[in-house]
Amino acid sequence: MHAYSLAPGAAIVTKMAKGITFDRCTFQNLGSAGINMLDGSVGNTVKNKCI
């Protein structure tokens, strides 16, 4: 079993994602992560107060 499969879920999950930008995102009342980037996700950016 992979370690990431034991992690709590997230509002957004990427796998093998390339070149995605998350800009000025707001995540509320999740009880977990807002963004989780998994296997092979490269060149992605989180910017401008993505909370």
Image (spheres, helix red, strand yellow):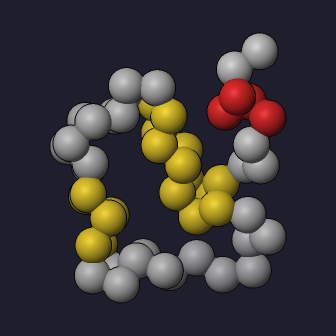
33 vs 18: above or below:
below
Residue lying furthest front: 3
Residue lying furthest top: 1
Residue 33 percent location from the top left of the image? 64, 62
Residue 8 percent location from the top left of the image? 77, 49
Q: Measuring 65% from the left and 54% from the top, which residue is drawn there?
A: 10
Q: Measuring 47% from the left and 43% from the top, which residue is drawn there?
A: 37
Q: Is residue 40 left or right of residue 39?
A: left
38 vs 33: above or below:
above
Return the residue nearer the eye: 10 or 2.
Answer: 2
Q: Is residue 25 left or right of residue 30?
A: left
Q: Is residue 45 left or right of residue 5?
A: left
What number of labels is visible?
0
- Quarter holding the N terminus is top right
Q: Measuring 74% from the left and 71% from the top, which residue is drawn there?
A: 30
4 vs 44: above or below:
above
Q: Measuring 73% from the left and 49% from the top, which residue is drawn there?
A: 9
Q: Is residue 14 left or right of residue 2?
A: left
Q: Quadrant of residue 41?
A: top left
Residue 35 percent location from the top left of the image? 52, 57
Residue 40 percent location from the top left of the image? 37, 25
49 vs 1: above or below:
below
